[in-house]
Image (tube, rainbow, N blue to C red):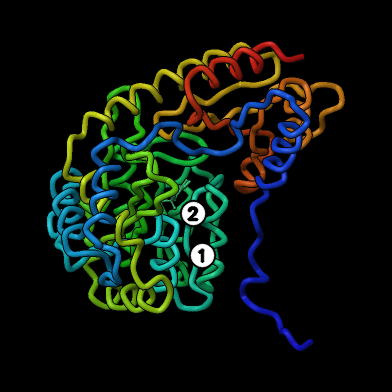
């Protein structure tokens, strides 16, 4: 055949899948396993959101929609961005609705980058970010997340850097940037005249009273990205959204949506309107439940002989350093399998998130509280 090389060949495909397959195989063999390898909210949809989706179908709102999203949803999003994120100029005409946050990320980077453009991203980082940048023909530059702002300064004179990526709260470490750190990133971007791409998928999964700060509230050249997956436990319904006040970028994003997904599932868009405009108590209830789980797993892992956890300020991930290696264990991958074998608890090896993940593993605590509690006891005691 004559299939030539393609940009898609450059990207890697889900290293975590290997662990997931093993967990599923153990499950088939009748073993008790704990799915802490990846994050997906355990909560069910709020009833009014379910009802709105049912009603949309009942009322035959099942036709093609505007490829940037139904006007009702773009209006609800724009109002939320102004009210909650303090993005003052958000209007229904400068937001798009995407097929999950992931689709918004792709549409953003594809619209923003020319081949070879560099994007600064944190190391470690949720695996897909670097892959999406590569798919958009860009080059990810990974800088250690704990010294992100200082490290950036080394690129002050690098003209190939066209954007800085921010993800706060941060997957996988759970780190939340302080308002001062956000200001530092803004100063850097401003002095270079480049964009900030801000992935705020975990804006509502944030603990101990911390406040989420949207860079878009302070810096115009920000493309702000959001997801309904975590805030409203809508991960399978695939709704994300983005805001930019650049007309050039907006037009490109619009064209890309038109040529790829041509609008998100119509009924779920009505569900998203209900989620954004309806009662918000659910969001706070989920947040406190996640915080409870955070405390359970953090306390347990702190007592483990082998692991030293980083306390997450947000997200539902616990990042843990391997402080002592069991005899047969040499690296993070081994540790993941060792733990799985000894306890049935799944985790993700740190290096899948970038070189800085070497010597770490990540647990997701999005599974229900009892499940997290049982898994935590096993992690605390394993030998
Ligand atoms: N951004 C980050 C940092 C994530 O961890 C995720 C999902 O895990 C997403 C974006 C996208 O989520 P979704 O495509 O479900 O909106």
In the rendered image, the residue lying farthest to the right is 328
- Asked whether mark 2 and ligand 1 are closer than 8 Å, the reply comes as no
Q: Secondary structure at mark 1?
A: helix
- Tell which of 245 and 236 is nearer to you: 236
Vertical arrangement, residue 383 with respect to residue 180, above or below? above
Q: CA distance from mark 2 to mark 1?
A: 10 Å
Vertical arrangement, residue 333 with respect to residue 381, above or below? below
Pointers 2 and 1 in contact (C-beta within 8 Å)? yes
Give coordinates of residue 236: x percent, y percent.
44, 48
Is residue 202 rendered to the left or right of residue 56? right
- Name the quadrant of the N terminus: bottom right
Write down the residue under mark 2.
Answer: 121
Q: Nearer the viewer, mark 2 or mark 1?
A: 1
Q: Residue at x 22, y 64 (%)?
A: 70
Whether residue 168 is visible: no
Whether residue 194 is visible: yes
Give coordinates of residue 163: x percent, y percent.
40, 63
Classed neighbour count for the residue bearing mark 2: other residues with Cα under 10 Å, few (<14), some (14–19), many (≥20): many
Write down the residue under mark 1.
Answer: 133
Give coordinates of residue 60: x percent, y percent.
25, 62
Vertical arrangement, residue 371 with respect to residue 75, above or below? above
Q: Residue at x 48, y 31 (%)?
A: 366
- Tell which of 64 and 315 is nearer to you: 64
- Asked whether mark 1 and ligand 1 are closer than 8 Å, the reply comes as no
Is residue 288 rendered to the left or right of residue 28? left
């Amino acid at each position: 055949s004559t299939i030539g090389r393609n940009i898609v060949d450059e990207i890697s495909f889900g290293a975590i899948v290997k662990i997931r397959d093993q967990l599923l195989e153990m499950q088939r063999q009748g073993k008790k396993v704990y799915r802490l390898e990846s994050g997906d909210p355990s909560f069910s949809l709020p009833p009014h959101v379910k009802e709105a989706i049912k009603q949309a179908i009942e009322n035959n709102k099942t036709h093609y929609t505007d490829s940037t999203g139904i006007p009702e949803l773009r209006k609800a999003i724009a109002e939320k961005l102004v009210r909650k994120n303090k993005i003052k100029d958000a209007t229904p005409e400068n937001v798009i609705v995407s097929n999950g946050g992931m689709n918004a990320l792709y549409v953003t980077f594809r619209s923003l980058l020319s081949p070879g453009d560099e994007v600064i991203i944190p190391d470690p980082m949720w695996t897909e970010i670097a892959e999406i940048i590569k798919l958009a023909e860009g080059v990810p530059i990974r800088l250690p997340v704990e010294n992100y702002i200082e490290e950036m300064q080394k690129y002050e004179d690098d003209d190939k850097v066209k954007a800085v990526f921010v993800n706060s709260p941060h997957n996988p470490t759970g780190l939340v940037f302080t308002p001062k750190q956000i200001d530092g990133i803004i100063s850097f971007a401003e002095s270079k005249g480049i964009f900030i791409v801000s992935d705020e998928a975990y804006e509502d999964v944030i603990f101990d009273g911390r406040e989420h700060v949207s860079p878009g509230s302070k810096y115009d050249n920000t493309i702000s990205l959001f997801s309904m997956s975590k805030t409203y436990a809508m991960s399978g319904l695939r709704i994300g959204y983005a805001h930019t006040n650049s007309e050039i970028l907006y037009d490109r994003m619009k064209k890309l949506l038109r040529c790829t997904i041509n609008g998100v599932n119509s009924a779920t868009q009505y569900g998203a309107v209900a989620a954004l405009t309806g009662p918000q108590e659910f969001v706070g209830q989920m947040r406190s439940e996640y915080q409870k789980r955070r405390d359970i797993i953090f306390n347990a892992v702190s007592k483990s002989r082998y692991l030293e956890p980083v306390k997450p300020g947000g997200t539902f991930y616990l990042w843990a350093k391997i402080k002592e290696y069991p005899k047969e264990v040499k690296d993070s991958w081994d540790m993941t399998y060792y733990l799985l074998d000894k306890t049935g608890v799944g985790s993700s090896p740190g290096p899948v998130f970038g070189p800085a993940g070497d010597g770490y593993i990540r647990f997701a605590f999005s599974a229900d509280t009892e499940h997290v509690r049982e898994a935590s006891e096993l992690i605390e005691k394993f030998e």
